[in-house]
Amino acid sequence: MPELPEIENARRQIERWSGRRKLDAVWVLDPAAVRRALSSRPSDRLEGGAERLEALLGRRTTGARRHGKRLAWILGRDALLFHFGMTGFFTQRKTREDPPPLARVGFGFGRHAIWFVDGRRFGCLVPIGADEVDLALRSGQGPDAWDEAPGGPALHAALGDRRPLKVALMDQERLAGLGNIHTAEALFRAGLHPFRATGSLAAAEWDRLARGVREQLRIANEDLAAEEEVQYVNLGGPNPFQVYGRAEEPCPACGTPICAEEQAGRTTFWCPGCQPAA
DNA sequence: GCGCATGTTAACTT
DNA sequence: GAAGTTAACATGCG
């Protein structure tokens, strides 16, 4: 479920799994996963991508950085920029050449392997230079919703005055990191209706929204850090969210049935009791 | 088989 | 022109 907390979790995972070890094998199972730029289209594949990855053999990993939903894995003077699309994630195997289902690219370290897995293939990785990481992470992106969390006034300035609240919050150019799920959850925490126009919020409501975003990301980060492997909503297990995916179920706070409606092509969930329309 | 899906973006419509 | 919605991408899952 790749939004900011899940990407941050993936960042921690590859740092922990690769340490400062030397990359000694690369397996490109899906050449179209290696792209010439961040793109959700497999047709933007980088020709010769497998060779570019093989050039990284022998490099020592030196950490990973994140901005919004973008992740950069640093390998000496080179780096790999990742976007997880809808279904991307990292997983670890204790033996080599034992790829998990839907694995796209694998990285070998001694007896271990780290795999980039992505069923739906909207995710990708892009080989870049370590000196390009800053720009690649930030270009076209608003402030990071976690590391650079804006307060009420800054959030108002970033999101502007016209668009519906939820659509504005999900615009990565304005605020980087929130997707459909965590936006719905943050709005529930703030008690704000997703269809409200940004221009209609009072200063106190902007403060509440800023707190709701921070609270949602903090909780999600803690929950993920407590798990050994990421559990996806659609991969079994109970739904951990308060409103997302809970149409017609009672609101955990007030018992009113949760509403679901399409907004800008995505399903939006909210509690009509806790998040009044005006 | 059918409908839906955590993201991005070009194309289309107001 | 700006803002908003829809379709498309490619695939898996319930």
Image (cartoon, coloured by chain):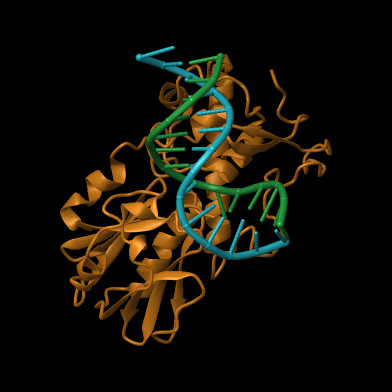
Chain colours: A orange, B green, C cyan
In the image, residue A116 sits, relative to residue B5, either above or below, namely below
Quarter of the picture holding the C terminus of chain A: top right
Q: Is residue A112 left or right of residue B5?
A: left
Residue A144: quadrant of the picture? top left
Residue A94: quadrant of the picture? bottom left
Q: Is residue A146 left or right of residue A260?
A: left
Q: Nearer the viewer, residue A67 or A54?
A: A54
Picture coordinates of residue A168 (x, y %)?
50, 29
Quarter of the picture holding the N terminus of chain A: bottom right
Q: Nearer the viewer, residue A35 or A273?
A: A35
Q: Nearer the viewer, residue A244 or A242?
A: A244
Residue A124: quadrant of the picture? bottom left
In the image, residue A15 sits, relative to residue A248, either above or below, namely below
Look at the image and tell me whether residue A208 can be seen: no
Looking at the rendered structure, the number of numbered marks drawn on it comes to: 0
Picture coordinates of residue A230 (x, y %)?
55, 64
Q: Nearer the viewer, residue A173 or A209?
A: A173
Picture coordinates of residue A31 (x, y %)?
33, 66
Residue at the image position 58 percent from the left and 15 percent from the top: A200
Look at the image and tell me whether residue A172 can be seen: yes
In the image, residue A30 sits, relative to residue A264, either above or below, namely below
Residue at the image position 26 percent from the left and 69 percent from the top: A50
Q: Is residue A163 left or right of residue A134?
A: right
Picture coordinates of residue C12 (x, y %)?
58, 65
In the image, residue A115 sits, relative to residue A179, either above or below, namely below
Residue at the image position 54 percent from the left and 70 percent from the top: A228
